[in-house]
Amino acid sequence: MYDAYVMARYRDQFYHECSDIVERSHVYRNHINKFIEYLSRPEVNLADSPKKIDKNTIEECIGYYHEKGEINTRATMESHLESLKKFYKYLNETGKDDDIFAEVSNYGEFKNDIVTRFGLSESNERGYYSSGEIKELLLVLDNAIDSHREDNAGIRGEERYLQRVILRLFIKITLIAPAKRSVIINLKKSDIKEGYKRICINNANINIPNGLTRDIKHAIAEAKKRNGVDIKEEDNLFEYIYRYKGKFGGEKLNAWLCNIVQDFGILDRSEGKKSLAVEPIRNTAIKMMVDNMINPVLISKISGITLAMIESTYYSKDWTIKYEEDLDRSINRAIAQNDYYCYI
């Protein structure tokens, strides 16, 4: 008979005794915490029964987080498995429990079966992400920001928090208005209108989803406390938010994206890298609009890419252009069709 929460105790002992490993990679902590939380759910009820946990438990855990939108890709699933393998190696070496991965005769086949069972997205090396990857990225950013505790964050933790606040704003704005990075990072407070409900980008008035409205207001309010001055209409949005830390530059976004991807083990494009280009996020939004058969006139308007380039890159030769009278309305309707929209 095991004491309640025995798996949580094992986890904490692992974190303490293997702190050098855990501190080098937030991935382990993120995914092992997910596993313990899953075991503690009333319908699972295995947090105090280590001997009842097997490889099927791990599969069901992945399925649970897939339904929640937190494990959508092979890359994130593999990060989850590798974290649990490290955890169970510790449990086995310390005599606390058997290594349940020892019962997996073919690890590659095991992973392939999970991908097939839950329909996880495969990675690709092209210049865009899948919808599942975008959802994972947004959820990880939201969770990381919401779990921040200012009173015990420390200097490094405070810096990471600010980076993630700015990165989330940049990504969400790019997803609703896939303009060039240089356009997004030069947005002024005056470009945000109607009580944070619309934003003007490339002379198009884009509706701001409620979640993004909340994020913008929160970021400005936090910056005001630290800057000691209100944001002015002519102020650059991102420069104002980052002002108390120093000078903001758009090139920082690549490093910050790489940090969040490596810290939480999502996607699979950052191994061995110190930066990760943010441009594929814009490409993703454009590609999804194309896949939804959106008029290229609308895509050209919001993205700033010439109509000729849009047509030659994405559309077949027999595509017929039909101009819309109300471009703003049509653009907003088109963007709202993208699968990730409800996550913004």
Image: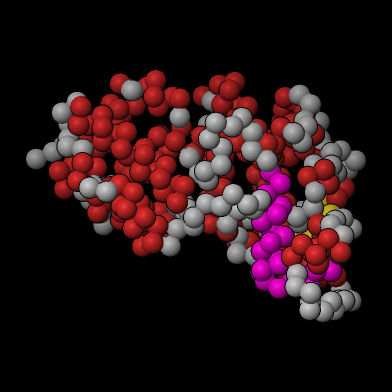
Q: Is residue 183 left or right of residue 7?
A: right
Q: Nearer the viewer, residue 28 or 34?
A: 28
Q: What secondary structure do most residues of the magenta stretch adopt? A: helix
Q: Nearer the viewer, residue 152 or 87?
A: 87
Q: Is residue 43 above or below residue 314?
A: above
Residue 113's x, y, as percent?
34, 58
- In the current view of this chain or complex, which residue is farthest to the front? 317
Q: Is residue 120 above or below residue 243?
A: below
Residue at point 42%, 42% (across, down): 79
* Residue 247: quadrant of the picture: top right
* Number of numbered discs: 0
- In the current view of this chain or complex, which residue is farthest to the left? 1
Residue at point 40%, 34% (across, down): 29
Residue 3's x, y, as percent?
16, 37
Residue 105 visible somewhere in the drawing: yes
* Residue 43: quadrant of the picture: bottom left
* Residue 182: quadrant of the picture: top right
* Magenta segment includes 271: no
Residue 220's x, y, as percent?
73, 40
Residue at point 60%, 60% (across, down): 340
* Magenta segment includes 286: yes
Residue 264's x, y, as percent?
49, 39
Q: Which residues are magenta?
A: 278-297
Residue 217 visible somewhere in the drawing: no
Q: Quadrant of the N terminus?
A: top left
Q: Is residue 51 left or right of residue 144?
A: left
Q: Is residue 255 left or right of residue 66?
A: right
Q: Is residue 108 left or right of residue 44?
A: right
